[in-house]
Image (spheres, rainbow, N blue to C red):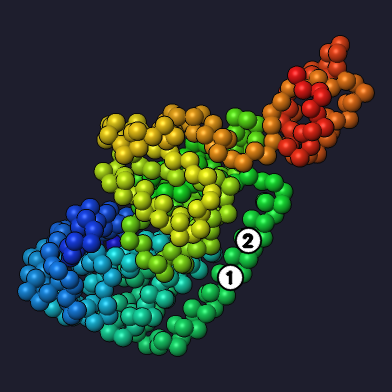
Amino acid sequence: MDIHDNIENKTRVITVCVDTGEFDAERSTDELCELVDTAGGEVAASIIQKRPSFDAATCIGSGRLEELAELCSSLEADMIVFDHELTATQIRNIESVCGVFTIDRTMLILDIFAQRAVTHEGRLQVELAQNKYRLARLTGMGVKLSRLGGGIGTRGPGESKLEVDKRHIRARIQTLSRELKEIEKRRALLRGKRKKDGVLTCAIVGYTNAGKSTLLNTLTKAGVLAEDKLFATLETTSRAIELPDGRSVTLIDTVGLISRLPHHLVEAFHSTLEEAASADVIIHLCDASAEDCAEQANVTLSLLNELGCGGIPIVTVLNKCDLPEAGDASIFADRDDVIRISAKYGSGIDAMLGALAKALRPTAQRIKLLLPYDKSGLVNKILTGDGKIFSQEYTDGGILLDALVDNTILYIFESFRI
């Protein structure tokens, strides 16, 4: 079935979550429903079952599985999506009882990634993640592996037929890994060149759908796709802006994060996320209107620690403060260092840019100078030293300058400062 045939023929999905007490099952189910919507499906029903642990054979237990089969039949469901990673045996057992195509949360996220990836690197990353995931579940996954481009969970360059054996998949994984390593090397060289040239960088990180792309578009008119959907952006986009102190900083948009993002997915997109680890400052963008804003913030901070971003200054920014849901009961309400903005309408942007300038290591200073005419050659010294001239006026006493001067040559101008 192609879910894009027409809008009224969306794939009808039943979501299933087993509540073992490890996380908030209701919020996780809501997020799963959002993921289904992003993938192009329609949630017909959601089931949450409390259990002390997952059933090894069917995840939810045989009795509840029979009820699920009846629900699939009565609602004419096309697919079941579990909010947990399933084994190949569990998938086979569920499909044999319910007669409905079954996938899990990870496969759903991979499907969305497959839809959204547009660059060569993005496609390679998706295919690598798909192949790694399928390799461990090759045995018993005949129903899925025999479907090519049949809807949610089956799209993307990493799809394989039943006849493709583990050796072929392993060989493909090795090929993809080599290609991505070459891309990572090129990206690392670019990062190194930026550092060498003294280019300051700021990575925008945060939960998926927090408004990172909207913020980048507001600041730079970058024209990046910004939708009210999860994982609207998978590709890295960078644009330069000028801070209030006159310095330039390159903003880098990164892939959105999500709770319980499987490790191999993080691993597959490591080269993209590494932009945060090498940045001079990080904007941690939070959705102030989200009920679980605190949890989303913790997910982001946890991953930043995993990537080794501990020593990088972080500017915490609450976005969507124009929405009534944001209110004043934010978990950040008692913090003076948190900036509140609306990326959509541009409010609070000046305060955010000021906080960025303050957080960045001091590399240059904006000063006023009065240069004697016999020292006019120092104007070029400023420009060749990655500085800027904001205004220049010829007076009786000399050349009056408003300039940004690199710290490495600042000592030359101390006697001419006003």
Place of residue 397 in the rendered image (x, y in percent of width and height, measured from the top left):
86, 13
Which label is found at residue 181? Answer: 1
Place of residue 380 in the rendered image (x, y in percent of width and height, measured from the top left):
84, 33
Q: Which amino acid does label 2 sit on?
A: Ala
Q: Quadrant of the C terminus?
A: top right
Residue 135 placement, left or right of 361: left
Secondary structure at badge 2 equals: helix
Secondary structure at badge 1 equals: helix
Q: In this view of the protein, can residue 240 be seen by the observer?
A: no
Which label is found at residue 188? Answer: 2
Residue 197 placement, left or right of 229: right
Q: In which quarter of the image is the N terminus?
A: bottom left
How many numbered discs? 2
Place of residue 280 in the rendered image (x, y in percent of width and height, measured from the top left):
58, 47
Label whose residue precedes the other's in the sequence (2 or 1): 1
Q: Which amino acid does label 1 sit on?
A: Lys
Residue 159 lies in quadrant: bottom left
**Residue sitting at 73 percent across and 37 percent down?**
407
**Vertical comparison of 183 with 253: above or below:** below
